[in-house]
Amino acid sequence: MDQDKRLLHLPPLQMRLSMRSDCPYISGRTEQRVAVDISENPALHDELARAGFRRVENWAYKPVCPQCKACLPWRVDVSAFTPSRNLARISRANSDLSRSVGRIRPTNEQYNLFLSYINGRHGDGQMANMGRDDFISMVENSPIESFVMNYRDGDGRLVGCVLTDVQDDGLSAVYSFFDPAESARSLGTYMILDLLAYTAERGLPWLYLGYFVAGSQKMMYKSRFQPAEVYVDGAWRTYTDSKQQTSEPVR
């Protein structure tokens, strides 16, 4: 049988296990991650993403929390997605916004918007202490194809951004931030809707939205974007109902 000898010489993945910390989504639980540096082999990213990993800078990571499987990787079926009446209303409310796709070269304008978002929405969160260098690293340090989607109002003012990864089977929303003073626009929801449209424009089947945690108010917004699949027990499965995707710890 003909074989590709190169496969025999691939180095094993060097996985690292993070320290345990308090879970930001479920009170009283502990968070822990396994991560791999993909900077030397970025081609691994898409395969890891299909196995439920996410990217932050040059690392691909996945939760391996002790006795808990609440975090479910979530991807939206782009071609089958149909917005609800409420989502359609949000799209109409933002019809004045213009979209542009920019390179991953952060600007002062983006950084100032990021600061406003963090201070207005997540002042007590893990990212509250991020400085300019941290922000630049978050945006620029990507070993794979990435871009920043920018949204401006009719006056040309930047109101929202989404750092996005390009995969062979879809797009992945890495991180989004927006003007907290524009709460009436529901910009976080709108940018996902528009990213779904952009994914369809590129002819890609999936939009990856990170992890969904049933019962967590911070994550419930993702359930609005269906049909979707979650990665459970080594396979992507159609999401049905949060009651069926239990967040109870494994006994």
Image: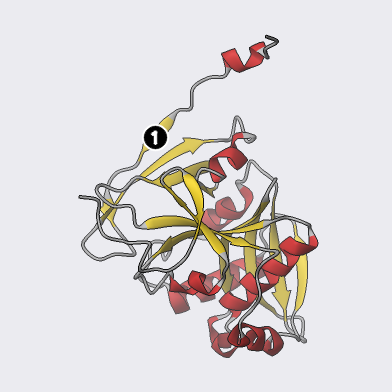
User: With 245 as the anchor, is 87 left or right in this view?
Assistant: right
Quarter of the rendering containing residue 190: bottom right
Number of numbered discs overlaid on the protein picture: 1
Question: Residue 125 lies in what quarter of the image?
Answer: bottom left
Whole-percent x, y for residue 185 in the image: 61, 87
Residue 138 in view in this figure: yes
Q: Residue 193's spot in the image, x, y percent? A: 65, 73
Q: Residue at x 73, y 78 (%)?
A: 152
Please determine whether, in this image, residue 36 is positioned above or below residue 24: above
Residue pictured at 56% horizontal, 44% vertical: 50
Nearest to the observer: residue 2 or residue 199? 2
In this orientation, which residue lies closer to the viewer: 189 or 20? 189
Question: At which x and y percent is residue 116?
Answer: 53, 76
> Which residue is located at x 37 percent, y 67 percent?
214
Helix, strand or loop status at disc 1: strand
Report whether 77 appears left or right of 115: right
Picture quadrant of residue 150? bottom right
Q: Viewer-proximal residue, 30 or 229?
A: 229
Provide the residue designation for mark 1. Answer: 16
Q: Is residue 16 above or below residue 4?
A: below
Q: Quadrant of the N terminus?
A: top right
Residue name at image x 48 percent, y 62 percent:
239
Query: In the shown orientation, is residue 51 left or right of residue 161?
Result: left
Find residue 103 and report its horizontal and vertical position in percent: 74, 56
Residue 58 in sight from this viewpoint: no
Q: How is the image coloured?
A: secondary structure
Residue type marked 1: Arg
How packed mark 1 is, by other alpha carbons closer than 10 Å (few <14, some 14-19, many 20 or more), is few
